[in-house]
Image (cartoon, coloured by chain):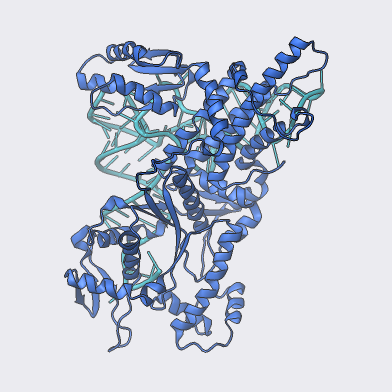
Chain colours: A blue, B cyan
Amino acid sequence: MVKVKIINYLKEVVKEPVSIEVFVPDNEKFGHYSTNVALKLAKLRKQNSMTVAEEIKSVLSRVVVKDFFKKIEIAPPGFINFWLSEKTLQDKIKEILKKEKKYGQQLKAKSSKLKAISIEFISANPTGPLTIGNGRGGFLGDALANILKFQGNKVVKEYYINDAKASTQIRELGKTAVGIGKSYKTKDLELKIKKLGPKKAKNYSDAGYLLAKIIQEDNKKFIENKLKIKFDKWFSEENLYKSGAVEKLLGELKKKNLIYKKDDAIWFKSKQFGDNEDRVLVRQPRVAGQAGEPTYFLPDLAYHLNKFKIRKFNKVIDIWGADHHGYSPRLKAGLKAFGIADEKLKIIISQLVRLIKKGKETKMSKRKGEYVSLEELIDEVGLDAARFFFLMYSPNTHMDFDLDLAKEKSLENPVYYVQYAAVRCDSILKKPKFQSPNSKQIPKPKFQNLKLLNTKEDLNLIRMLVRFPEIIEEAAQNYSPQILVRYSLDLARQFHNFYEKEHIIADLRGLNADQYRQSMDFMFARLALIQATLVIFKNTFNLLGITLPKKM
RNA sequence: GUCCCUGUAGUUCAACGGAUAGAACGGCUCCCUUCUAAGGAGCAAAUGAGGGUUCGAUUCCUUCCGGGGAUACCA
């Protein structure tokens, strides 16, 4: 990685304990890469920052491999700016084409145990179809899992099915199933109830459980076939009861003296572990004399303990909708009671999506059945567009999804812009002219010609390609797939720009032998560049989970 | 009340504390004898308000004014 290389060079020069940051400046006149380390050092040493920068620069030139940089400049108030040499850039094409799918991948040392990460997302209630909010979290989780895997982590994607018979929502669903529920029934739900048939369930909870199973099966099919998201693990809440994990947890908490009884309910002393108040684990019995039912919290804590203690994940990521954020101190308190550090659980909150229809907000209401389901959305705008659109924005964004716009302007969607760039690469490479007479294959690039790639457009495009591994790392570290999406747009722009100005196919007619050879060499060099660009597009698309169309 | 997000061009969104705040859509000009114009070049257009920290603040702290969400023995 170019950036890492620069950082390492700086580390040889700067011995003080300052964090060395290298970044790509917005403006090209400040270099291909830049560092502010002199500014930080100046503060530490209480010296003039320009003097420090000057000093670092002069020592650096002794450390750096010859021809790695084209030039190094210092700029007020003390930035050090780097320009990569043409050779450094050209050589990268070779690396990209050699590594192909593996370019940008972090290969962890085999000996070191792989970091196992659990990432849980969607986990929609099995009481109805998936919402648009589920989609946002779903795409986010899926892309993030891909990125973390690419970074050399072992990743398990999982889905928690909230199907506990003991839960209120399942009992309510059961009431609906037998026709006494007061909740609104969509046509879809009516059909499912019919499918359930006249099977005599013992009670509402059982009826609800059976109906939830049917709904869940449909949701699963939808997720796998339409969202194209493959989970590694489907984890049932009800199983935590059946296996005795819930009961066992209650026993352990009792042993630790962390629960008490109040108002006939059982409470967890979560306040001891940083929560605002203590929380109920087992409700007051609905019928006097009977046992109370656990709240969602108890099995969920058992579930997370299962991830940490039984399956021994080093890191657990949960993706939740914003409406659940208040729940996190409670869960973290519960984990802390078992000695699990805060930073082991990363909760990503994705903000709610506002649906705009005809300029007005459409409230998503399950009860009234007024909401637009994720399925409808995908049917209207397509999977690639939907994925790209959701992934484009930071999870913190309270995004507005304009349905009319998404529908009408689907061709204006940025995903097409990016896909079009990749398709252009692909179609150039498939031009018959490039195929050697007796082969359908794209000719192997000739690396010795790469030095011919020296126009401004060539080099700008290569510079963008070279950033790919850096972008992946940044996206992984910040759990932010949107960084990769933004990059894909930048890359596409750079490519379209290149395409407009530079020709790849040479006109070979009427050339003498020398000219012919020159043109061919040049063409092969450009061909290699296009191949490398396509490699980066493909890698990006794979991580984001969008397709590369054959043609557009 | 308390807690979590959030306030940036007309609109939807970017910007590890960095240099001249970026895109896209919309608006206005140009560019198809050239590998797909689903493209390219250009113009106009923005940090809610006030303090503070810093060489440097959209970013951090603070007050105020907006918007969304949470404050359940729902999940």
Count of numbered tags:
0
Residue A533: image x %, image y %?
A: 60, 31
Question: Which residue appears at 67% of the width and 18% of the height?
Answer: A522
Residue closest to the eye, A426 or B56: A426
**In this rendering, does residue A368 appear at all?**
no
Residue B49 versus residue A224 in the image, above or below: above
Furthest residue toward left: A257
Residue closest to the eye, A26 or A504: A504
Q: Where, quadrant-wise, is the C terminus of chain A in this rendering? A: top right
Residue A413 versus residue A251 in the image, above or below: above
Residue A98: image x %, image y %?
A: 56, 32
Residue A171: image x %, image y %?
A: 44, 79
**In this rendering, does residue A322 appear at all?**
yes
Residue closest to the eye, A49 or A468: A468
Question: Which residue appears at 74% of the width and 10% of the height?
Answer: A514
Q: Where, quadrant-wise, is the N terminus of chain A in this rendering? A: top left
Residue A400 is left or right of residue A20, and the answer is right
Residue closest to the eye, B6 or A543: A543
Residue A524 is left or right of residue A95, and the answer is right
Residue A496 is left or right of residue A238, and the answer is right
Quarter holding residue A412? top right
Residue A32: image x %, image y %?
A: 46, 21
Question: Which residue appears at 70% of the width and 42% of the height?
Answer: A550
Quarter holding residue A526? top right
Residue A176 is left or right of residue A13, and the answer is right
